Image (spheres, rainbow, N blue to C red):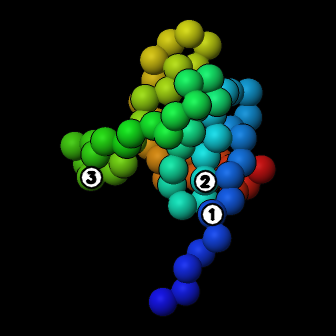
Amino acid sequence: MLEEKEIWKSLPNTQYLVSNLGKVFSKKSNKELVSTESNKGYLCVCLYLDGDKSTRAVHRLVMNISIV
């Protein structure tokens, strides 16, 4: 099996980094965020965007950094 190299990119206008392997890192707390499974089976993380807590699907965050 080929191992894919992990690439980190900044999520635009936030304090978060997202990897192509689905990891999310907070630059503010210097910690990797823990993902939880939604009731539909998707991995999600809680982000603070503009002071409000927001839950985002990890696969959508990876898609956002891949397009940028």
Q: Which mark is residue 41?
A: 3
Give percent across and percent down for residue 52.
50, 12
Q: Is residue 8 left or right of residue 60?
A: right
In primary-sequence order, the first of circles 2 and 1 is 1
Give percent across and percent down for residue 18.
61, 46
Mark 2 and mark 1: Cα distance apart in space: 6 Å
Q: Is residue 53 left or right of residue 68?
A: left
The three-letter code of the residue at mark 3 reads Gly
Residue extending farthest front: 30
Above or below for 43 versus 25 = below
Residue located 61% across and 13% down the image: 50
Q: Residues within 10 Å of mark 2 (few under 14, many from 20)?
A: many
Mark 3 and mark 1: Cα distance apart in space: 23 Å
Residue extending farthest left: 39
Residue extending farthest right: 68
Query: Is 12 or 9 nearer to us in this picture?
Result: 9
Residue on which the image places disc 1: 6
The three-letter code of the residue at mark 1 reads Glu
Mark 3 and mark 2: Cα distance apart in space: 20 Å
Q: Quadrant of residue 5?
A: bottom right
SS assignment at label 3: loop
The three-letter code of the residue at mark 2 reads Ser
